[in-house]
Image (cartoon, rainbow, N blue to C red):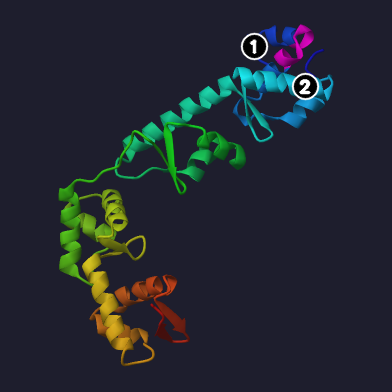
């Protein structure tokens, strides 16, 4: 029996697979077909529809190949061990390159990595979960051997500026200019400070030192202990800032259920 649904052939492919399809055992035919499916894999039901054999015999062949480690099964998807190994190597190389170029980032976005391989989400997630050398935290992937780190000196330099500027902190770009760092590096350092809790991320460009953030919350509590609501202008005056800062602070407070916007005023809902 020849393969009724062959993939595109090249001259260098030879005819060994065709000979296998013609005279091989059921297990050999299944292994060859799954191998040709590469990392996309092949649904077990598709094997049954492709191969002219009894379903129990096909299932026995799949079970035999799985026990031998020739193919791996993820739900209904079958993937050849060779394709799995290629996948493992590609993932390792991509993460190594990412860590090399982004030594301060905790890892690579799972969706970004999946998109580069153009893989079906469910199969990709199953394969990633089986890789011992890869760690996943939420939707961030990294090699277990990798550990992002920032020097205490860099963290201290950034925190010093944030503390000095108080409730009028510089933007990420302004901070980079002041410290002679590119904005990407500043952003990475800020990511570490936010994770540690020594800084609070307001938006992509703006962060407060923890001390300044705590001061803002105390000023809010003091205001709302006397008044039931607060306008943007009042908030600006309470902090001694401008609308440039007041508006993003209020957006942050609203989104984190600290304040609630009701028309043109805010209510305090922090418990």
Q: Main secondary structure of the magenta part?
A: helix
Snapshot quadrant of residue 140: top left
Q: Is residue 127 magenta?
A: no
Snapshot quadrant of residue 247: bottom left
| Residue drawn at x 23%, y 70% as measured from the top left | 212
Q: Is residue 23 magenta?
A: yes
Is residue 85 toward the left or the right of residue 201 in the image? right
Circle number at residue 50: none
In the image, which residues are magenta? 21-29
Q: Position of residue 26 (x, y in %)?
A: 76, 15
Callout 2 crowding tier (Cα within 10 Å): few <14, some 14–19, many ≥20: many
Q: Position of residue 193 (x, y in %)?
A: 27, 56
Circle number at residue 58: 2
Q: Between residues 176 and 110, which one lies in front from this camera angle?
A: 110
Is residue 34 toward the left or the right of residue 230 in the image? right
| Residue drawn at x 37%, y 33% as measured from the top left | 97
Label 1, secondary structure: give it. helix
Label 2, secondary structure: give it. helix
Q: Position of residue 158 (x, y in %)?
A: 19, 57
Q: Position of residue 71 (x, y in %)?
A: 62, 22
Q: Is residue 105 among what the camera can see?
A: yes
**Residue topped by disc 1:** 13
Q: Quadrant of the N terminus?
A: top right
| Residue drawn at x 37%, y 76% as measured from the top left | 250
Is residue 266 toward the left or the right of residue 114 in the image? left
| Residue drawn at x 67%, y 22% as measured from the top left | 34
């Amino acid at each position: 029996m020849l393969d009724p649904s062959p993939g595109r052939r090249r001259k260098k492919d030879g005819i060994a697979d065709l000979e296998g399809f013609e005279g091989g055992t059921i297990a050999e035919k299944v292994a060859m077909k799954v191998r040709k499916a590469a990392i996309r894999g092949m649904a077990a039901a598709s094997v049954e529809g492709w191969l002219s054999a009894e379903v129990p015999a096909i299932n026995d062949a799949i079970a035999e190949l799985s026990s031998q480690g020739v193919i791996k099964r993820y739900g209904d998807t079958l993937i050849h061990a060779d394709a799995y190994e290629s996948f493992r190597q590609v993932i390792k190389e991509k993460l190594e390159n990412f860590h090399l170029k982004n030594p301060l980032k905790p890892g690579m976005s799972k969706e970004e990595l999946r998109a580069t391989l153009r893989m079906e989400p469910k199969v990709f997630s199953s394969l990633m979960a089986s890789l011992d050398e890869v760690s996943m935290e939420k939707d961030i992937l990294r090699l277990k051997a990798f550990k992002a780190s920032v020097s205490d000196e860099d963290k201290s330099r950034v925190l010093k500026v944030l503390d000095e500027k108080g409730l009028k902190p510089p933007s990420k770009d302004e901070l980079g200019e002041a410290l002679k760092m590119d904005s990407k590096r500043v952003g990475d350092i800020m990511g570490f400070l936010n994770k540690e809790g020594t800084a609070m991320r307001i938006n992509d460009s703006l962060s407060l030192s923890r001390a300044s953030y705590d001061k803002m919350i105390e000023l809010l509590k003091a205001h709302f202990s006397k008044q039931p609501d607060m306008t943007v202008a009042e908030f600006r005056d309470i902090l001694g800032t401008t609308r440039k800062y007041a508006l993003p602070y209020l957006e942050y407070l609203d989104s984190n259920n600290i304040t609630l916007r009701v028309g043109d005023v805010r209510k305090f809902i922090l418990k």
